[in-house]
Amino acid sequence: MKILICGGAGYIGSHMVKMLSEAGYDVVVFDNLSTGHREAVKWGTLVVGDLLNKSDLKALFEQHDFAGVMHFSARSLVGESIVEPAIYYENNVVGTYNLLEQMRHSGVDRFIFSSTAAIYGNPENTPIDEAHPKQPINPYGHSKLMVETMLNDYARAYGINSVSLRYFNAAGADPSAQIGESHDPETHLIPNILRSLLLEGIQLKVFGDDYDTPDGTCVRDYIHINDLCQAHLKAFDYLGSHKGAMAFNLGNGTGFSVMEIINAVTEVTSKVVDYSVEARRPGDPAVLIADSQRAVKDLNWIAEYTDIEKVIETAWRWHCQQSY
Ligand code: UFG
């Protein structure tokens, strides 16, 4: 079965490509390499192209007969989205619209979409389930919610069936250490801690220690990248027998504060993390924890990495191999 992975050169997409290839799928990666890495596409076929270029899409779908599409291509920095919202509406909304239109034209009707906890905005309760009000507080979250809205309409009107997976904090790397998390600039907590241990003269900044949490630092729900990818595999199967536009949260259901993550990194690496406490980062909610029971029940999915140190260990192994 041939599957198109848009954004397969990025962090989550490249792990998905590996898992699908190992499960026997024929994988085609479509990526403009703006934030992804050519060297991360170690499995499948890479086609360099842009979702904003309709002729790239037309040629791609004419050349291949896809059973379905998984869509990881997106700009995903909250701060950047506030300063440059146009980039987010263009890439995340218009790009996805072009892709869906091409799918419609080519008769491809299975779609897995990378959504985000950012569609919920500031949590009104915790843990967050799928029924929580959707009130994004930044253009990134808005752009993802707009696509979810489109997907509801495309399922009803055109029979394009979809699963939106609302990620909490993706973390870790494939245990083989062949692929991992690499962004430029890097803004995520775990890679930033690990880089501070490996790079000369880099000190970790802790953004705020005066939140209403047990130790004052923000609490997040970290889910291992391969658990996340497993859920995509299950969601793809689910679409074989379920019609409509469905959505599932994906998290571990356990929160860790920034300080707890720093301490867990020390446990894993036996290194002391040098950090300074800085002002809060704008737009950071104090606590984000997922209720993923719907995915457990309907997709028959279960997170295997429930130990945060095991998650960090996989990331550390990959980071140690990078030539910083
Ligand atoms: N943090 C630091 N120092 C750093 C990096 C992060 O203290 O160098 C803190 C942040 O302030 C936050 C926590 O660590 O409190 C986690 O930050 P990340 O940037 O790793 O992750 P976020 O929770 O901000 O982002 C995640 C996803 C986004 C998504 C967002 C939704 O990565 O794609 O949740 O709110 F938009």
Image (cartoon, rainbow, N blue to C red):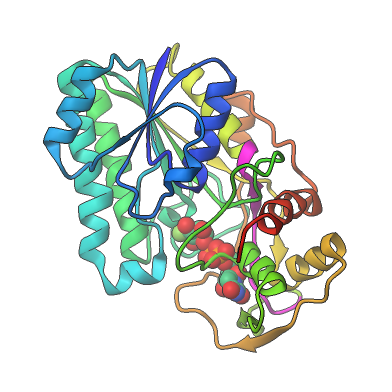
Whether 282 is drawn above or below 224: the answer is below
Please indicate, yes or no, whether residue 323 appears anywhere in the rendered image.
yes
Location of residue 318 in the rendering, given as x and y in whole percent from the top left corner: 67, 51
Say whether residue 252 is left or right of residue 146: right
The residues colored magenta run 215-226
Quadrant location, the N terminus? top left
| Quarter location, residue 304 | top right
Asked if the magenta segment contains residue 225, the reply would be: yes
| Quarter location, residue 160 | top left
Which quadrant of the render holds ligand 1? bottom right
Q: Nearer the viewer, residue 84 or 288?
A: 84
Location of residue 249 in the rendering, given as x and y in whole percent from the top left corner: 53, 42
Identify the residue at horizontal 45%, vertical 64% (top origin). 184
Identify the residue at horizontal 83%, vertical 63% (top origin). 269
Asked if the magenta segment contains residue 316, the reply would be: no
Whether 160 is drawn above or below 76: the answer is above
Whether 24 is drawn above or below 175: the answer is above
| Quarter location, residue 64 | top left
Quadrant location, the C terminus? bottom right
Location of residue 251 in the rendering, given as x and y in whole percent from the top left corner: 62, 46
Q: Count the marks: how many?
A: 0
Whether 269 is drawn above or below 18: the answer is below
Q: Nearer the viewer, residue 37 or 261?
A: 37
Location of residue 118 in the rendering, given as x and y in whole percent from the top left corner: 44, 57
Identify the residue at horizontal 59%, vertical 22% (top origin). 22
Say whether residue 54 is left or right of residue 26: left
Identify the residue at horizontal 38%, vertical 59% (top origin). 135
Q: Nearer the viewer, residue 169 or 153?
A: 169
Please indicate, yes or no, whether residue 130 appears anywhere in the rendered image.
no
Which residue, as the protein is rendered here, is positioned at the far front?
323
